[in-house]
Amino acid sequence: MGAIMSAVQMAAGYCFCNTASTICTTCLESRSASSTGRKRSVILLVMAILFALLFQYTLAPSILHKNKLWNLYKSIPGMGKLLYSSWTENCDRFGDLDGDKADLYVQCVQNSGVYRPMGVASIFFAISAIGTYVNPSLNREIWGSKYLAYLIGLIISMFVPNSFFMGFSLVLVRLCAMAFIVIQQVILIDMAYNWNESWVEKSNQCEAREWGSGKKWLQAIVASAILLYIGSFVGIGLLYKHFSGCGGNEAVITLTWIGILLMSGIQLSGEEGSLLTTAVISAYSTYIAYATVSKNPSAVCNPTLGNEDVWGIAVGMFLTVLSLSWTGFSFTAQERLSEAGIESTRALNPSDPARPDAASLNLDTPFLDPEERRTEGLVVQPNENDNFNSAAGSLIWKLNIVLMLISCWVTASLTGWGTISGGVGAEGEHTAANPLVGRFNMAMMAVAQNLAVCLYLWTLLAPTLFPDRVFV
């Protein structure tokens, strides 16, 4: 009887493993010529973000309070103690769980729960960027193994001491998050141009069917731009109301509305860009201004100090979703990341990995259907990798860089840019242990915001300043 049960268990195990392997191969692998692996990359980063939220709000509290979930870890010999010491290392300098500054201690441990899955994701995409720079086709291969490698790295990271994540690594995360603020603006520009062109095209289609019927789409574009501008100026007014009184805050807010006026004036006075795109960038600049002044470590200048920035986290995650959607599903993502794409002031034409390069077309040969062409020369099997490497895949490494920067941005958004933000004392002083970090973060975000605005201003002014240069 025992032999029969063992045989049944082995058969069930074989069926399960075989089914799981088939599902992974079907879902994660693709040999299609049009596949670039971008969607699978986005799925992996989404998985990392979910792990970060799980670790921050479930695993970290269970480690601190040693609840039922902690008993599961402790049941593994030696692992419970190692896990606890790894996650709480360096957090005792902010206080202890039973002391007056327990909130700082808890924040430190919760932040360490974010650093691990997002740190592994950042390393994964950095390695992928290097690999795909050498061979772009690597981005669409062996995804089952890539997911497994990420999970193994995540498990290992759970037992890595906090000192690895809180030293130079955290400074690097802040710098990469700062770079993403500029890249995010490029993403929003591309999405706004596509949005504008889509509605203009709908207007033209309606006009072709019935004269005057396309006006509603043009009105919708103007209405959307007006709503974004209203939101921007209302936001600036609220920033002056709640965050004024300090020179640094007022400089950030003032430069923001001056930048909005400059962008709008230059766009309206010329032929480049679109009003909707400028309105989107204005709204984004206003959000970055809020994110900047909310990092001020002075209680006098920052009324949100000591409170969890729910609104800031929500908007940060919304921008993350937009960026992931653009990276994984936009047909113009790779073109927009090229030098010509960044400087372009219109929607770009999507690339097709299955389409041959324009340089390889012979204009002396008539454009015939492949089945109608006369067969000449030696017939060979086409190499999909060559076509992929010479077309859309040539810029795929840049998308991996974007995903790495998104990983750092998520880390910064969920951890308050690595700050440990406590309450406010009786005399109004900040009780956090690292106010200098808050000032450093504030300066970095302000610089990144102004770089993003200057980049957009350049795209508007460049065609006028350099009329002899061709801008796509």
Image (spheres, rainbow, N blue to C red):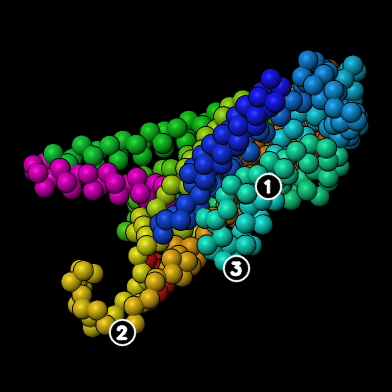
Q: Could you tell me residue 351's position as x and y percent?
A: 38, 60
Which portion, as a residue range, is magenta?
190-212
Does residue 193 belong to the magenta stretch?
yes
Q: Could you tell me residue 248's position as x and y percent?
A: 69, 41
Residue carrying label 3: 134
**Residue situated in front as seen by the camera: 229 or 364:** 364
Asked whether disc 1 touches disc 3, contact meaning CB atoms under 8 Å apart, the reply is no
**Residue situated in front as seen by the camera: 138 or 427:** 138
First in sequence, mark 3 or 2: give its number: 3
Quarter of the image that includes the C terminus: bottom left
Residue carrying label 2: 377
Quarter of the image that includes the N terminus: top right
The reply to whether residue 254 is visible in this rendering is: no
First in sequence, mark 1 or 2: give its number: 1
Residue carrying label 1: 149
Taking the image as shown, residue 276 lies to the left or right of residue 121, namely left
Q: Residue furthest left?
A: 210
